[in-house]
Image (tube, grey):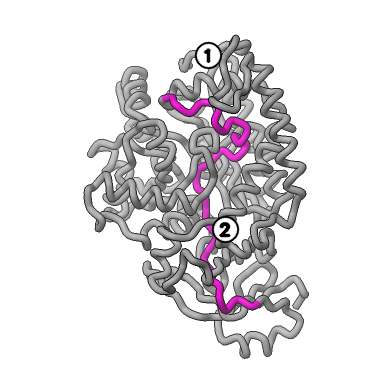
């Protein structure tokens, strides 16, 4: 056994067992990035002489959060366009994205991953352009990633043919990488041609590659789909035979009874993105009803250009409050459901094996909270404390694939200050190049939009 192996001594451990949350005081043995045993410390230590022991008596170990829908390089656009509907927001952001270099995307991703890790996220499902540099950033920092090259057919922005080819190239390059998984990422039904969606469907079946798409985010989008195809986005995806357990739909805020039944019957995975929905003034996905009907619902922050952060603890809290407000009942959804959405449901949605739980045989993606803090006393009802009380400052350690990557709020795998400085420079150059002037008091002023805002037509 190598000295890289860990023995977490006597934390309280939050695990999912038979659909329920169980909290027990157990030591956790981690070997080669895998949780090999939970048990009494003395017994585990006896057979693990060279292991690094970490005292965890006052700690809570939970599965690392899985951010099932995000665009991490968009840290660069944080606060750039705050007060717009989704489609109007895209008209501002897409032209600016044309100005990004691969280097810009790399540093934007580094910043987003630093932010994610510090708030307990150990795995992300990213959906962006030039995803290979996002993968490079994730490997630099040690984050598990499901990476998706955004596929668009908007004139002047992207060609879906090139993006589909790039997805297949990345799939072949990383198919044996334990920390990287590749998925197709058609942006939406209104921005990708039918023949492109049909090709993605066929390739998904041939190579067993998942599909990650935005759909039914707003009534505006649904109306646009009805205008273009005579069908809602979900109905159109059904027509193209894209609805399956291989499909992950982000948002699903505007869902009628027919769409609901299609999602349920086709076993489609949903990722709930509550902050963006509320920030854009949209409807809210009926998560409580979906969960009651057996739909697998995960949780995502969306990108920091719309959220404007990547904090999954905050996202859990907003998710549970939004559902209780939507259904006008505190019993509509509980902390167990939201904790599942942020962890094990995310693993299921992304078809990740042995991820999202603390149990023997699972990947050692673990977050350790300090329980001796003002927000966790009195110590009882721990699941409630995690959802309603704690914040990222209560995190002592983040472990991904058996390696300690965050310790007491500090990322161990990179010089954070250099990344912060670099992204600030990227932002200032990008904004000025786009004909805008940054302000400390408001979002950037649009002096002259040097890049034409393309209409949302195919």
* 262 to the left or right of 106: left
In the rendering, at what x and y percent does residue 321 appear? 34, 50
Q: Of the numbered discs in the image, which one, if any, rests on residue 454? A: 1
Check if residue 451 falls in the magenta segment: no
**Of the pair 147 and 15, the residue shown nearer to us:** 15
Q: Secondary structure at mark 2?
A: helix
At a point 57% along the width and 80% down the height, the residue shown is: 10
Kindly identify which residue carries mark 2. Answer: 393
At a point 48% along the width and 28% down the height, the residue shown is: 82
In the rendering, at what x and y percent does residue 231 appear? 31, 26
At a point 64% along the width and 61% down the height, the residue shown is: 400
How many C-alpha atoms fall within 10 Å of the one at disc 2: few (<14), some, or many (≥20)? few
At a point 76% along the width and 81% down the height, the residue shown is: 50
The answer to whether the residues at label 1 and label 2 have Cβ atoms under 8 Å apart is: no
How many C-alpha atoms fall within 10 Å of the one at disc 1: few (<14), some, or many (≥20)? some
- Quarter of the image with the N terminus is bottom right
Span shown in magenta: 55-84
In the rendering, at what x and y percent does residue 19 appear? 37, 67
Residue 50 vertical placement versus 93 (above, below): below
Q: Secondary structure at mark 1?
A: loop
Tag count in the figure? 2
């Amino acid at each position: 056994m190598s000295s890289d192996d860990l023995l977490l001594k006597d934390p309280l451990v939050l695990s999912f067992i038979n659909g329920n949350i169980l909290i027990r005081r157990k030591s956790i043995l981690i070997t080669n990035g895998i949780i090999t045993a939970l048990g009494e410390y003395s017994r585990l230590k006896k057979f693990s002489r060279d292991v690094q022991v970490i005292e965890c008596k006052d700690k809570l170990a939970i599965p690392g959060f899985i951010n099932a829908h995000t665009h991490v390089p968009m840290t660069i656009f944080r606060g750039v366009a705050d007060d717009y509907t989704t489609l109007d927001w895209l008209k501002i952001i897409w032209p600016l994205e044309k100005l990004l270099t691969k280097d810009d995307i790399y540093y934007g991703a580094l910043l987003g991953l630093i932010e994610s890790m510090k708030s307990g996220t150990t795995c992300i499902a990213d959906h962006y352009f030039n995803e290979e540099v996002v993968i490079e950033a994730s490997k630099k920092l040690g984050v598990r990633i499901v990476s998706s090259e955004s596929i668009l057919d908007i004139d002047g922005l992207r060609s879906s043919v090139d993006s589909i080819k790039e997805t297949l190239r990345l799939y072949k390059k990383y198919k044996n990488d334990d920390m990287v998984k590749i998925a197709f990422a058609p942006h939406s039904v209104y921005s990708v041609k039918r023949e492109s969606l049909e090709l993605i469907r066929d390739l998904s079946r041939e190579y067993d590659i998942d599909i990650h798409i935005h759909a039914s985010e707003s009534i505006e989008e649904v109306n646009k789909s009805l205008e273009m195809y005579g069908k809602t986005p979900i109905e159109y995806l059904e027509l193209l035979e894209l609805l399956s357990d291989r499909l992950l739909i982000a948002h699903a805020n505007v869902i009628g009874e027919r769409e609901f039944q299609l999602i349920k019957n086709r076993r489609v995975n949903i990722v709930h993105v509550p902050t963006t929905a509320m920030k854009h003034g949209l409807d809210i996905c009926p998560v409580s009803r979906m969960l009651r009907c057996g739909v697998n619902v995960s949780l995502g922050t969306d990108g920091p250009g719309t959220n404007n952060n990547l904090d999954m603890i905050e996202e859990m809290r907003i998710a549970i409050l939004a559902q209780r407000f939507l259904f006008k009942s505190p019993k509509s959804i509980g902390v167990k459901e939201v904790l599942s959405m942020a962890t094990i449901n995310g693993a299921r949605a992304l078809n990740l094996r042995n991820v999202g739980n603390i149990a023997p045989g699972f990947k050692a993606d673990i977050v350790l909270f300090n329980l001796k803090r003002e927000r966790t006393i009195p110590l009882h009802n721990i699941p409630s404390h995690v959802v309603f009380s704690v914040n990222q400052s209560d995190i002592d350690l983040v472990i991904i694939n058996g390696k300690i990557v965050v310790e007491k709020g500090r990322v161990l795998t990179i010089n954070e200050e250099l990344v912060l400085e670099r992204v600030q420079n990227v932002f200032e150059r990008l904004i000025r190049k786009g004909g805008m002037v940054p302000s400390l008091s408001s979002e950037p002023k649009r002096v002259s939009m040097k890049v034409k805002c393309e209409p949302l037509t195919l």
